[in-house]
Image (cartoon, rainbow, N blue to C red):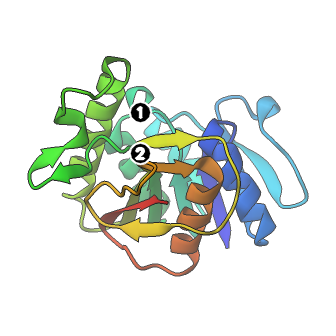
Amino acid sequence: MKVALIGATGQVGSRLLSELTRRGHTITAIVRDPAKAPRGPLVVAGRGDVNDKAGLAASLRGHDAVISSVRFLDSDPAALVGAVRAAGVKRYLVVGGAGSLEVAPGVTLLSTPQFPAAYKQEATRGAEFLAYLRRVGDVDWTFLSPSALFFAGERTGKFRLGKDQLLTNENGSSISFEDFAVALVDELERPAHVRERFTVGY
């Protein structure tokens, strides 16, 4: 597929870029400054600002899918979805957050007393982003939430998928950037959570 990846140089974005190229997809790495974009046999640079709907739409046009891997505090869901819509791209996948996942019926991770204050603002914006997407009916979006501990690790290809509940095991709740990328590219290739949020964890 021809995939536009917004945020290709970030911690998760760079792993998504690796996973996409590993599987033979062609990627346009959308960054503000194309001179700083990664390049490779299957990777080209594209210019785009997440808050410039018209300019971003022009860079997204002609792609089979768009993946956004950007901080929620740095982006506006209306601008991003609007750019995807204006570009005529139907498939939109979002690197989500864990804060909006439930730890008990009606209780989100974000609302628990132990949720780190340093991440509260970003997690709140992530929950708002998901709420916005749930009102979008004309774009085939998917929002993938990681587990509570999201870290640089290994690509094992062994993980579990869930829906709106935080996944935990005897070691807590965790997923590597690398395995998160596997799960998201799996969803891109074999859509199973269209207009849904799902989650991945060990």
Residue with the most extreme left position: 106
Residue 195 in which image quadrant = bottom left
Residue beneath the point at 78% across and 63% down: 21
Residue beneath the point at 49% across and 65% down: 89
Residue 150 in the image: x percent, y percent? 51, 42
- Look at the numbered discs 2 and 1 and tell me whether their residues touch, using CB distance below 8 Å: yes
Q: Secondary structure at mark 1?
A: loop
Out of 182 and 84, give the one closest to the viewer.
Answer: 182
Residue with the most extreme right position: 41
Residue 187 in the image: x percent, y percent? 51, 72
Q: Residues within 10 Å of mark 2 (few under 14, many from 20)?
A: many
Out of 14 and 135, give the one closest to the viewer.
Answer: 14
Q: Which residue is mark 2?
A: 80
Q: Quadrant of the N terminus?
A: bottom right
Tell me the amino acid under the disc marked 1.
Ser
Above/below status of 116 relative to 100 = above
Residue 57 in the image: x percent, y percent? 51, 49
Q: Secondary structure at mark 2?
A: helix
Q: Which residue is mark 1?
A: 75
Q: Is residue 7 visible?
A: no
Residue with the most extreme top position: 118
Residue beneath the point at 89% across and 52% down: 40
Residue 180 in which image quadrant = bottom right
Residue beneath the point at 37% across and 51% down: 81
Cα distance in 3D space between marks 2 and 1: 8 Å
